[in-house]
Each structure stands twice: as C-alpha cells, then as structure tokens.
Image (cartoon, grey):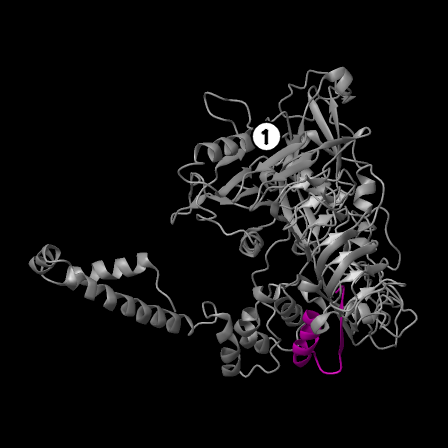
C-alpha cells in the first residue's frame, strides 16, 4: 500500500498542529528536522488509517472489496458462488448482490419472484419469470371465463400482436394461451420446446444494453430522416426502470426491449392529456436547435394522422378543424428509428422549405459496449492510454487543449470545428517547441452531431494527440445540484459525434495518435512518415484503417491497435511491424454500406498480428499470427507458420495457420459447422452476436468456456450456467425451470 504526497503532507500538518507552536517555529528556523520526522511518521499513520478504513468497509457487503465477498458468502452459508465475473474479467458483474440478498431469497423460497431475482442478480441482466401453466389453453367453465388467457391473438387489443413478436421479447410477454406439452422444458437452440407444461417455469433474460442518445442529428436518407450513425434503419428502445423489491415481477417497463409503436402512442396520449410528464417521453424532437416539440406535434407512424386545428390547446377553436396545425409536426417510426417532418401539413422538402436540422433524443440498444456509443467509455479510455507505447511527459488528463463543437467565445462565436481545434493544438506545440517540447495534447469533440470534411492530423516528434468524444466533466455537489463543469477536465461519455469524411494522419518520429468514441464514415488513413503508435478505441469506422506507403518509406516502428471498435477493414503496408485487435469487429460489409467495395478483413503482410476476442468477417493475411477466442470466418493465410499460435478460435475452411489448440476445426479435421449470427446488419442491436443455433463448439469454445468472438469478454455462457446452479435451491418442489434468451 502506497501513500501519495498530498495525503502524507495532510497527515504531517495534522501531527504538527498537535505540537506547541513555538516548537514548530524553532524547527523551521533550524532546518526542519522535526517536520521531516513527522513526515516519516505521517506516512505510516496514513497506512494504518487506510487499513482500518478498509477493515471497517469489509464488515458490510455493500462496501467490502470484491475479494472479501466470498468470505461474506461463507458467513451466510452460500455455496457454489460463481467465479469472479467482475470488471477485471470484462463481464462487469459483481457477486455482491447475490450475497447481499441471500437471506431475502430464503425468506421467499418457492415463489416465482425469487427465481427472477436470483437470475437477475447472478447474470447482471434484466429478467422476467413466467409460470407457463398460466398460459395453457383449457376448456373454460361458463362460470369461470378467463378473458386474460385468449387462445387467439386480438388484432384490436393495444399491443396484443406486438407483444407476440419474437423480436420483442422472445415470448416473455405473451398473453396467448398454448396447448399443453409433456416434454421436459428445454431452453436450447430449438427455441424452447416443452415450455408450456404444467410444472414448467421459464426465466427470460435480456443480455442487452440500452443507451440514452441525446441530440442526435437525423440524417436524410431518401424521403426519411434516420437516427442511426450508419444511416440504417434501427429500432429505438425504452430505458428500463429499476426494480426496487424482490416481490415485484418484471413487466415490459422493466425490460430492455424495443419501443413498440402502440406503447409510444399511449405515452404520447398521456402527455397530451396531462396525465404524464412530457419530460419522461422516450422520444423528443427539436427543430433548428429550438425547444422540444410538444407531444401533440409528435405523431406515431401508421397509428395516427397529423394533428388538426383544435387538437392543440394553444388554438382558439375558431379555425377550421379539418386543417393541419400550422408549424412543424413530426411523424416518428420507432421500429425503424426514423422521422418524417411536416411543415404546415406538407411533407418537409429542403428544396421548398429550406434546409432545417432535426435533433432527436431517443434510446438505442446493443449487446455490448463495442463501437462508438453514448455509454461511459472512461475505463476503456484509460486502458487504451495505458496500453499506448507512447510515454507521456505530463498527466494525460490534466486538461483539454482544444474543444471542438462549442462556440469559441465572444471573439469567435461560431462553433469550433475539429480542424480549428487541431490547428489550435498545432499552434500550442509550435509555441512550446523550445521550452516544453512534446507531451500529450487532447482535442475533445463535444458536439454529438456531424463534422463534415476530412480531418487532417499532423503529430510532431515525441508527441501524442488524443482526439476523444468528450465534454468537460460536470460536478455534482453534496446538495445534489450540478455545478459548472471543471474547465479542461473531460469525461468520455454521453457523446457519439460523426466525422463525415476521412481522418488523415501524418506522424513524425516518436509520435502517437489515439482516436476514441468517434464515428468515421470514411477511412482512417496514415500517410508515409514515422508514426509510432495508432490506437483506434471504441470507434466505428465505416471505411478501413489504412497505412499507406511503399516498402521503403512507411512507418517502420508503427504499432496499430484496434480496441472495442467496429471497422470495415485493416490494410497495412508491409513495413508496419505490429497489429493488435481486441474485442472488435472487422467487417468489410461496413465498407459496402459506406458506398465502397468489399475487400479483405485484414491485410498486414509484414505485421505480427495479435487477435483477442474479436470477430473478423473476411479474409485475413499476415506475416505472424497469435489469435485467441476469436472468429475468423474467412480464409486465414499466415506466412510464418513456425511461430505463433491459434487458440480457442474458429478459422475458416482452407486456412493456413500455425499450430492450433482447441480450435474449430482442429488441425486434422476436414471441416466443421460455421458460426451462425443473430444478425449481420451493422445497425441491428444484435450485431454480430452468435445465434442460439450456432454450434456449441463455437458458443462455448472460447477460453474458459465462454463464446468465441467479439462478445467473449461478456462471459455469457458462464453467467447462464451460474444462474442455473444458484437458482436451483429456490425452485418449488416438483417444478422444472428453464432459462431462455441467453
């Protein structure tokens, strides 16, 4: 345990204050020997205080360190505690909740609510428990009619058909009756045969993340405006509520499911009638940076027409009620994530009405924090900086040197572009060249909308440039009020800006570049030079990561790292010695969506390529390969096969690789079934998760029994196995339980 200088000085001042004032005054006059002695004592005192504080925290499961949790589990007699799936493992699931709630579980043993809670605490995923016997179709007695158990789906009931959609909740919200089954409940890839039996209980888990997206600029695609950064249809979500008690059974508001049109309509009607707060709506639209449109001016696609005069409380009622409201109305489609604006009742046409911008607040879903998104990227951002081979001269987060996407002040009221911010950083480097050369400079992109045009970055020698989607970090006071942000200290969260163009990089000797949180609709292109390090972290690059040049002039010491990102391809000139891909997706289909032509996933003829927990959908070619827990579903060709290793990975048929260890197929096998994906659409929330029908050797073939591919770090099979094991003691006698959706 170490003690920092600030803490040591604080405790030294405390000890000095206990001595008579004249003693310390005399000591200052004679060289400060007493204070030096107090400083040595203060360091040990601080260590003892920290140890006592940690010991006190360990008494309570809410504050105990993670390594203490298994000891607390022994105190309550909890056996078979799942393995560590905390932040260090990548899954980010603490065992704290299971231990904290074990006594409450036992008090409610045998109830369906406790089954739901145990699975939710163990997996870290929202869950819903369903007693299947309540959904069995039976011959109804005329004195005991069951209108809540219809045998046929109602086309009139609000949400009746929508709740049955398999893409919504995989049957967890169904209200229709089913014929009885006698087979044992099976949550396997067949879709769950044997569900609807008398002794059967199902717990549906939802391994999805929901992110609130604010200020997203809707992009014109044909006659519609789409909100997805890749200009693709994508469903909106509703952020799930937090369940406060074990007795509460989860419903649709508690689950991370797509936003149904009828549910959105019900919420809008409540807001229009004053029974709901407009600020709680899952969708808001702003026109030209104005205020949010009132609920009456948001219309649900396919379920209602435009609002008429007299519908708006601001109208006097004297106008013709057959005429549409004056001003803006927006028809929203939550299924495709698109809007269609209307002005004075006419469809919006930029050629007629002029150019206007539409910002949409909504929520998006995904399986994991991969690619650019509004999730908190702080931990991965710090890891990317720590893993950068560049050695910073000064503190990496001491300040933002230039901020893009905000006004430049009274002298420059226009919004600062990324090019302006980069130019300001270059001026700072030039001014400090003699007195303080090199170091790390940070450009934060604080605007979540589009930055049009190529971004040209030139990094001088022995310097690092960090371009990150981040705003200044706000401060929350003890009173709960939010104070002004701390100038210069940035927080990489809540933003997803787009660069509509290429990112062009030129680096001098010893230079480095880190991109974090950006959507780049073009290429990240490194020109010939002497760049030492390029890190693409938590970005979505619709084009390719390219290093240009010839065999004689390009970046001979360059290390290229792609972490938690989605890119369309990686192509490196033969002089680049190193490439690392971690928890990423490389899919040439992204390039096709951006209007380019498909190519190989990776072409790195001179690089030692390291691939960890990634999914590569295309051909891979490199000099030397080390791959672990990954899916390479194209042909992999390695030049030097005497070194390197392929472990716990899927390699496409015909691949020529170094020795294989527990790979699919094995080195002596002719072939094996390939991976099956839940979706191959980059805009889908399930992209590119493995389907439940994927071979078990791939779904559980990664290191440690986890799945292969980009979602390996989530440890989904291990979390499901732990839930099955720990929920078993709470299943009522004679009942069978199945866990679905994982």
The residue sitting at 37% across, 72% down in the picture is: 56
Location of residue 480 in the rendering, given as x and y in whole percent from the top left corner = 42, 47
Vertical side of 681 occupied by 195: above or below: below
User: Foreground residue, 454 or 325?
Assistant: 454
Quadrant for the C terminus in the image: bottom right
Q: Count of labels shown?
A: 1
| Residue 736 on the magenta segment | yes
Location of residue 75 in the rendering, given as x and y in whole percent from the top left corner = 49, 82
Graded by Cα atoms within 10 Å as few (under 14), some (14 to 19) or many (20 or more), the crowding at tag 1 reads some
> What secondary structure is found at the residue carrying circle 1?
helix
The residue sitting at 35% across, 68% down in the picture is: 50
Location of residue 276 in the rendering, given as x and y in whole percent from the top left corner = 61, 41
| Residue 634 on the magenta segment | no
Location of residue 273 in the rendering, given as x and y in whole percent from the top left corner = 64, 35
User: Foreground residue, 335 or 22?
Assistant: 22
Vertical side of 589 occupied by 667: above or below: below
Q: Is residue 249 left or right of residue 57?
A: right
Which image quadrant for residue 404?
Answer: top right
User: Foreground residue, 575 or 491?
Assistant: 575
Vertical side of 290 occupied by 529: above or below: below
The residue sitting at 65% across, 56% down in the picture is: 254
Vertical side of 272 occupied by 148: above or below: below
Say if residue 173 shows up in the picture.
no
Residue at the right extreme?
670
Residue range corresponding to the magenta coloring:
718-742
The residue sitting at 41% across, 70% down in the picture is: 57
Say if residue 664 shows up in the picture.
yes
Which image quadrant for residue 16?
Answer: bottom left
Q: Which residue is mark 1?
A: 419
Quadrant for the N terminus in the image: bottom left
């Amino acid at each position: 345990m170490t003690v920092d200088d600030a803490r040591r000085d604080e405790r030294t001042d405390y000890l000095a204050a206990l001595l008579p004032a004249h003693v310390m005054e005399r000591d200052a006059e004679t060289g400060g020997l007493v204070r030096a002695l107090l400083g040595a004592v203060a360091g040990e005192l601080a260590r003892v205080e920290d140890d006592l504080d940690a010991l006190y925290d360990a008494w309570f499961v809410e504050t105990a360190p993670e390594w203490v949790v298994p000891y607390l589990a022994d105190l309550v007699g909890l056996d078979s505690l799942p393995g560590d799936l905390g932040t260090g493992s990548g899954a980010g699931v603490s065992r704290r909740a299971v231990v904290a709630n074990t006594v409450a579980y036992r008090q409610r043993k045998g109830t369906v609510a406790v089954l739901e809670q145990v699975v939710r605490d163990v997996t870290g995923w929202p869950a819903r428990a369903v007693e299947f016997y309540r959904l069995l179709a039976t011959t109804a007695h005329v004195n005991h009619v069951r209108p809540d158990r219809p045998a046929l789906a109602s086309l009139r009931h609000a949400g009746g058909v929508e709740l049955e959609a398999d893409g919504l909740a995989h049957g967890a919200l169904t209200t229709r009756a089913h014929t009885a089954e006698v087979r044992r409940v099976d949550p396997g890839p067949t879709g769950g045969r044997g569900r609807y039996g008398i002794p059967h209980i199902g717990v549906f888990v939802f391994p999805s993340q929901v992110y609130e997206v604010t200020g997203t600029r809707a992009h014109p695609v044909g006659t519609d405006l789409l909100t997805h950064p890749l200009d693709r249809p994508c469903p909106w979500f509703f952020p799930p509520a937090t369940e406060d008690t074990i007795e509460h059974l989860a419903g649709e508001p508690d689950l991370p499911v797509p936003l149904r049109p009828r549910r959105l309509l019900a919420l809008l009607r409540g807001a229009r009638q004053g029974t709901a707060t407009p600020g709680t709506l899952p969708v808001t639209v702003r026109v030209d940076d104005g205020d949010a449109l009132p609920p009456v001016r948001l219309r649900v696609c396919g379920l209602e027409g435009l609002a008429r005069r007299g519908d708006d409380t601001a109208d006097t009622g004297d106008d013709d009620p057959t005429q549409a409201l004056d001003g803006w109305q927006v028809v929203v489609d939550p299924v495709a994530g698109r809007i269609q604006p209307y002005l004075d009742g006419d469809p919006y046409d930029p050629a007629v009405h002029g150019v206007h911008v539409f910002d949409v607040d909504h929520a998006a879903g995904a399986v994991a924090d991969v690619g650019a998104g509004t999730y908190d990227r702080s931990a991965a951002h710090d890891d990317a900086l720590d893993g950068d081979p560049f050695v910073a001269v000064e503190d990496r987060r001491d300040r933002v040197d230039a901020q893009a996407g905000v006004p430049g002040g009274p002298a420059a009221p226009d919004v600062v572009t990324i090019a302006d911010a980069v130019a300001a950083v270059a001026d700072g480097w030039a001014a400090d060249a003699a007195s303080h050369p090199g170091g790390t400079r940070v450009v934060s992109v604080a605007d979540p909308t589009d930055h049009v045009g190529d971004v040209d970055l030139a990094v001088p020698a022995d310097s690092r440039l960090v371009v990150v989607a981040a705003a200044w970090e706000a401060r929350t006071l003890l009173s709960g009020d939010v104070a002004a942000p701390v100038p210069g200290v940035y927080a990489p969260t809540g933003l997803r800006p787009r660069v509509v163009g290429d990112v062009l990089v030129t680096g001098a000797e010893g230079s480095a570049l880190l991109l974090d949180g950006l959507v780049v609709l073009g290429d990240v292109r490194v020109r010939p030079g002497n760049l030492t390090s390029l890190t693409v972290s938590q970005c979505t690059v619709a084009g390719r990561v390219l290093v240009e040049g010839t065999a004689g002039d390009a970046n001979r010491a360059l290390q290229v790292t792609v972490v938690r990102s989605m890119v369309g391809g990686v192509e490196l000139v033969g002089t680049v010695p190193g490439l690392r891909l971690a928890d990423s997706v490389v899919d040439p289909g992204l390039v096709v969506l951006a209007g380019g032509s498909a190519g190989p996933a990776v072409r790195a003829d001179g690089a030692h390529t390291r691939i960890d927990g990634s999914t590569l959908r295309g051909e891979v070619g490199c000099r030397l390969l080390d791959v672990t827990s990954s899916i390479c579903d194209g042909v992999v060709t390695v030049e030097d096969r005497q070194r390197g290793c392929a472990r716990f990975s899927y390699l496409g048929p015909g691949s020529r690789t170094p020795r294989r260890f527990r790979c699919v197929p094995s080195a002596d096998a002719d072939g094996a079934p390939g991976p099956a994906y839940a979706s191959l659409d980059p805009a889908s929330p399930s992209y590119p998760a493995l389907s439940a029908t994927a071979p078990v050797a791939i779904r559980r073939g990664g290191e440690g029994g986890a799945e292969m591919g980009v979602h390996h770090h989530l440890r989904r099979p291990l979390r499901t196995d732990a839930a099955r094991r720990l929920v078993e003691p709470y299943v009522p006698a004679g009942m069978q339980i199945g866990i679905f959706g994982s």
